[in-house]
């Protein structure tokens, strides 16, 4: 099967991190930025790296964005106008999937208006996840799945230890379902697919799926 191809435009901290993670996941990445020092850094791991101005339509077209599986517009605080322009140009060219980084709500709204398929706000997302971890005892991480669902990692409360998932009845009590369980064994974590008769042990981490606030309510009440 052919490897996925991605184009990452803008190599600040966010763009560089995304490009590196994509490469680690086996994706062919073309990394682009106007600054030579960033291109030099990206060349150490990216499939290809190119120094150019992506707001120039002719230069952008040379990158063949329509042939890529994914294009990430990671231009951030340096120039919101540039990120909007590049996103609009990509959509006009017929790029199949454009993900753009926003710096605030207005920026996000404009990016959607010019055609971004997906808009992310990494600073806000990180802040919200950190706040959940700090505010609710036992919550280790939260990953939103759209507006209606979230995946939450919860350190098993002491009150759960020794009970089976069936006995705990979490879907009925808190509207959350345990879809996986991370169990510490001999210093290493092992991910298990639990059954109804799986008994919760001390130091287990429960991976829950449910409405965004459901796991918070569980952590607050147990």
Image (tube, rainbow, N blue to C red):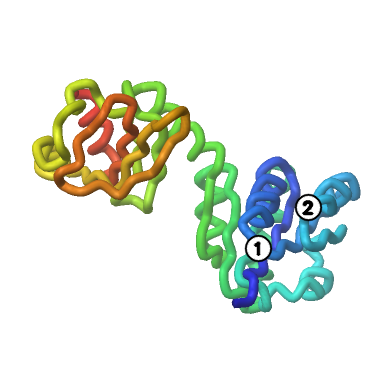
Q: Position of residue 114 (x, y in %)?
A: 57, 65
Q: Secondary structure at mark 2?
A: loop
| Residue drawn where x is 61% and y is 56% of the image | 25
Q: Earlier in the sequence, mark 1 or mark 2?
A: 1
Q: Position of residue 14 (x, y in %)?
A: 66, 44
Q: Give the side of residue 80 with respect to residue 175, left or right.
A: right
Q: Position of residue 43 (x, y in %)?
A: 84, 53
Q: Which quadrant is the N terminus positioned in?
A: bottom right
Callout 2 crowding tier (Cα within 10 Å): few <14, some 14–19, many ≥20: some
Q: Give the side of residue 82 with respect to residue 106, left or right.
A: right
| Residue drawn where x is 51% and y is 65% of the image | 117
| Residue drawn where x is 51% and y is 36% of the image | 126
Please tell me in which quadrant of the rendered image residue 56 appears: bottom right
Outermost residue to the front? 186
| Residue drawn where x is 72% and y is 57% of the image | 9
Q: Is residue 83 visible?
A: yes
Q: Secondary structure at mark 1?
A: loop
Q: Examine the rendered structure and indicate whether residue 143 appears above or below residue 61.
A: above
């Amino acid at each position: 099967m052919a490897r996925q191809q991605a184009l990452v435009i803008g190599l600040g901290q966010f763009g560089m991190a995304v490009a590196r993670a994509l490469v680690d996941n086996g994706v062919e990445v073309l990394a682009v930025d106007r600054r030579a020092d960033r291109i030099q850094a990206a060349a150490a791991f990216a499939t290809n790296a190119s120094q150019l101005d992506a707001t120039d339509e002719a230069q952008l077209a040379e990158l063949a964005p329509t042939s890529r599986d994914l294009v990430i517009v990671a231009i951030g605080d340096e120039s919101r106008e540039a990120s909007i322009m590049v996103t609009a140009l990509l959509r006009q060219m017929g790029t199949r999937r454009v993900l753009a980084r926003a710096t605030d709500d207005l920026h996000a709204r404009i990016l959607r208006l010019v055609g971004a398929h997906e808009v992310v706000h990494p600073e806000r997302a990180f802040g919200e996840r950190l706040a959940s971890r700090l505010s609710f005892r036992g919550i280790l991480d939260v990953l939103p799945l759209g507006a209606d669902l979230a995946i939450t990692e919860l350190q098993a409360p002491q009150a759960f230890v020794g009970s089976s998932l069936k006995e705990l009845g979490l879907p009925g009590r808190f509207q959350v379902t345990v879809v996986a369980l991370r169990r510490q064994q001999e210093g290493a974590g092992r991910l298990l697919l639990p059954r109804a008769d799986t008994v919760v042990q001390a130091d287990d981490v429960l991976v829950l799926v449910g409405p965004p606030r459901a796991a918070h309510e569980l952590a607050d009440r147990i």
